[in-house]
Amino acid sequence: MGSGERRSEINRVTERIIACIFEILTFVLICVYLLLTMGFDSYRRLSAANLLRKIFAAAGLTATLLLPVRLEAQIQYGAQQVAMLPPYCKYTLLFRDNVPGGNNPAEIERWTKIMGSTFRNMHHYCWGMMATNRAKFFSHTRQERMRHYFDSIGEFDYVIQRVPPDFPLLPEIFTMKGENLIQLGRGPLGILELQRAIELKPNYWPPYAAMSDYYKEIGDLAKAREWLERGLSVTPDVKALRLRMAEIDGAKDKRKNTPQRPEKPSAPQSPAEKSAAQPDSQPAEPPPPAER
């Protein structure tokens, strides 16, 4: 077994151990929660349905409290995935302790000066980008892809709630969150995030492209073209927007030039059908009486 295979096997075993510990902690905390919120004698008077409801409520609360711990423990800082992130990520908290070369005091100080105190929270944004890349490029099933997109939203929200409104990367974070919400099937919420990005930085073109892609996907070409026009009005030289506009115009021209199917000729009508189809016509005059 090579070193890479051995490392993968160790990672799999570690994940299983973490999962088991998580489940044990969940069970213990559920029991503690139930015992603290109700006395021993109270359970004797509970019906089975009410007891199950309380257990599920306690399980949900416990999972919510422990989920960040579990996600953080399961994060793997593979070289390929780290290389797909912006260069500052390796110097953020936790990344610097797991990525070779990340614990560089000079670089940490430089990025802290650039981003200010917000830099101490940016490892969450880097985790969100890593989850997004896993969803796009490393997932083998739809369920796995959706789980990574879902994980990314919480990481983006963590940063959004803690950065000042003039933080330079905020439009980028809103855009990525909006795109991932669309991938999760929550298009209207994703559109709101993309609009927030445009409000903060009108000349930032990626949210215009994402809005156009969404409307094109649902078949609203007029709306897709409208957002491209808005984007090109403030960033006229962006090739990505121009290519999208050409695709939409090509699709419209193709539909316009598609020959229409000729209508199928109707069967000839009988005299009775013709007269029935003309109820307002005047009755024929009777013939004159014959001369005697």
Image (spheres, helix red, strand yellow):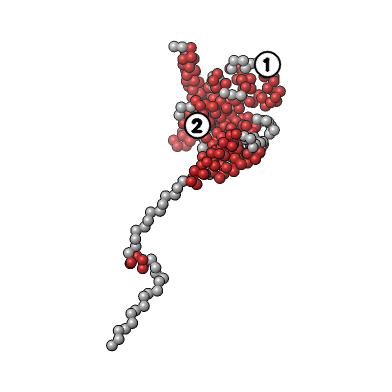
Report the front residue among 79 and 165: 79
Q: Residue furthest bottom?
A: 292
Q: Mark number for residue 283?
A: none
Residue drawn at (49%, 30%), measured in percent from left and top? 145
Residue drawn at (60%, 27%), measured in percent from left and top? 125
* Image coordinates for residue 254, horizontal then vertical, percent: 49, 43
Residue type at mark 1 is Pro
Residue type at mark 2 is Met
* Image coordinates for residue 172, horizontal then vertical, percent: 62, 32
* Quadrant of image for the C terminus: bottom left
- Is 106 placed left or right of 157 in the picture? right
Residue 284, quarter of the rendered image: bottom left
- Image height check: is 120 above or below 245? above
The numbered mark, 2 or 1, whose residue comes first in the sequence reads 1
Residue 92, quarter of the rendered image: top right
- Image height check: is 222 above or below 37? below
Q: Which residue is mark 1?
A: 105
Q: Mark number for residue 146?
A: 2
